[in-house]
Image (tube, rainbow, N blue to C red):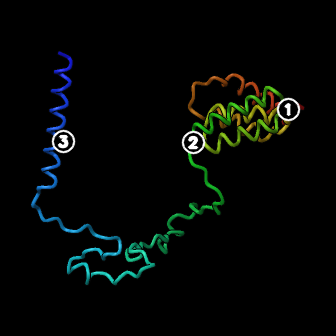
Amino acid sequence: MRFGIRLLVLGVLATSSCCTLVAQNGSTEHKSPKPQASDPLPRSEDDQHSAPPVGDNESSSKQTQIDISPPKDDAEKHPDSEVGEVTEMHAWNPHKAQKDLEVGEFYLKRKNYRAAEDRFREALLYKPGDAVATYRLAEVLDLQGQSGEAVKNYEAYLKIPSNGKFTPEAKKALVRLEAKQNPPQ
């Protein structure tokens, strides 16, 4: 019985492959040759007269260049919009920021404050406004004695909408640092 089923399956497969070969070879359709890479692109009559011809080493996108310079009266209408020279741009990358935050916390536990500061600053480059990185940066700056910048970062942390995990500590640090900067007379 098994032998009969196998023979039947082989017969069906052989018949279907033979039919496929006959269908491919017996076709009387006229096929046009495939275009070669060196063949010019087909163009309509309108296309040939609408734009100047493009040379071999020239891009067709040069024909549609757009002027992106600001309007002449832009400086008068927006006097405070002057942007300084941009030297480096970082893409928003929360995964990189999270890794920098983890490594920064590692350095903080090891009391390597300079390395921790660098990592927290880098985390803020890749994810500006991150609450934990802002708080940790303030904490590290405070530990290094950079009170002025620490106060700015503690205040920035308190302005960031977050779950407020470090809010009590940030408020205590601000009170302590402000008392240190302005001693009672």
- Measure how far apart labels 3 and 1 are at the Cα level: 90 Å
Q: Residue at x 15, y 44 (%)?
A: 18
Q: Residue at x 57, y 29 (%)?
A: 162
Residue toward you, 102 or 145: 102
Residue type, label 3: Ser
Q: The residue tagged with tag 1: helix, strand or loop?
A: helix
Q: Residue at x 21, y 79 (%)?
A: 46
Residue toward you, 45 or 180: 45
Q: Nearer the viewer, mark 2 or mark 1?
A: 2
Q: Do the numbered discs 2 and 3 sit on residues whose CB atoms are within 8 Å? A: no
Q: Position of residue 118 (x, y in %)?
A: 75, 41
Residue type, label 2: Asn
Q: The residue tagged with tag 3: helix, strand or loop?
A: helix
Left or right: residue 135 versus residue 45 is right
Badge 2 or badge 3: first in the primary sequence: 3
- Above or below, comparing residue 20 to residue 182 in the picture: below
Q: Nearer the viewer, mark 3 or mark 1?
A: 3
Q: Quadrant of residue 183?
A: top right
Residue type, label 1: Lys
The residue beneath circle 2 is: 93
The C terminus: image quadrant: top right
Rendered image: mark on residue 17: 3
Left or right: residue 3 versus residue 58 is left
- Measure how far apart labels 2 and 3 are at the Cα level: 54 Å
Q: Quadrant of residue 92?
A: top right
The residue beneath circle 1 is: 180
Q: Residue at x 9, y 61 (%)?
A: 28
Badge 2 or badge 1: first in the primary sequence: 2
